[in-house]
Amino acid sequence: MNIETKQQHVETTMRLAPVIPVVIIDDARYAVPMARALVAGGIPAIEVTLRTPAALDAIRAIAAEVEGAVVGVGTVLSARDLHAAEQAGARFAVSPGVSPGLLDAADNSALPLLPGVATAGEAMTLLERGYRHLKFFPAVPAGGAKLLGAWASPLPQLRFCPTGGISLTSAPDFLALPNVLCVGGSWLTPSDKLKSGDWTGIEQLAREAVLLKGVMA
Ligand SMILES: O=C(O)C(=O)C[C@H](O)[C@H](O)COP(=O)(O)O
């Protein structure tokens, strides 16, 4: 699959809802009810980060059992991560930044990558390699909506998913920008709600996030 086709998949995924939840999951048994709650609340794309040993099992379970979910993998740092997530059934991959090794691995993989950047130079390097859809990470510490908005005019080809430090309250500042298609955030799947099995609470957080559509550019 060429980069253009993979980027179209990334764009479709980014346009599914205003927020892509970023999940840190300690127990793969939470994966299916959590994903069902998010989908029921209107949030289909879910990024499960490779930060816990349960992550790959969680991706496998969501891919196999949750109708309507588009499960992705986050915290992808290497070719090995990309390969393992693809085998587990991930449909998109997200990385906090890029390395030459990861980009070469992504070129040779069918799994579409949403790579992270924090500077205009990194964004230009990825544009040269055919990427038009990027994650802006870590969004708030790196300069927030002000910085990202300043890239819209000189880098009009690029669309972003800012992630890192964003909340329901600050999401509208980003979503109102012309170069933002969605935001990422961990606030939809807080660890206390996962641990207590508060799936109704997670569905409610998803419903609130869907309402952010109203502020989008
Ligand atoms: O490791 C990755 O690939 C990531 O995607 C990092 C996450 O984007 C942030 O950890 C988001 O977390 P919050 O700032 O709590 O919303």
Image (cartoon, rainbow, N blue to C red):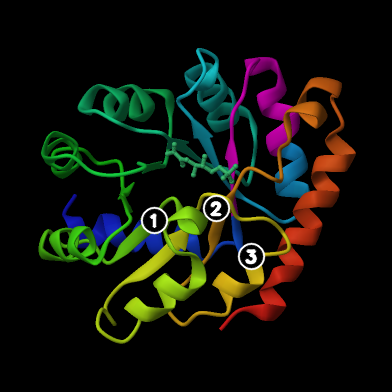
Point 80% across, 42% down: residue: 202
Please say whether residue 187 is one of the residues in the magenta stretch.
no
Query: Hey, which quadrant is residue 131 in on the image?
Result: bottom left
Is the shortest distance between ligand 1 and the CB of mark 2 under 8 Å?
Answer: yes
Point 72% across, 56% down: residue: 42
Q: Are marks 3 and 1 in contact (CB under 8 Å)?
A: no
Q: Position of residue 31 (x, y in %)?
A: 66, 26
In the depicted structure, whether residue 50 falls above or below residue 140: above
Q: CA distance from mark 3 to mark 2?
A: 9 Å
Closer-to-camera residue (62/143): 143
Q: Are marks 3 and 2 in contact (CB under 8 Å)?
A: no
Instruction: Point out the tag, 3 or 2, that comes first from the N-terminus.
Output: 3
Instruction: Point out the tag, 3 or 1, that comes first from the N-terminus.
Output: 1
> Which amino acid, by three-letter code, is at mark 2?
Gly
Point 24% across, 41% down: residue: 110
> Which amino acid, by three-letter code, is at mark 1?
Lys
> Which amino acid, by three-letter code, is at mark 3?
Ala
Q: CA distance from mark 2 to mark 1?
A: 9 Å
Which mark, by number, is residue 184? 2
Quadrant the C terminus occupies: bottom right
Q: Position of residue 53 (x, y in %)?
A: 50, 12
Which mark, by number, is residue 62? none
Closer-to-camera residue (113/86): 113
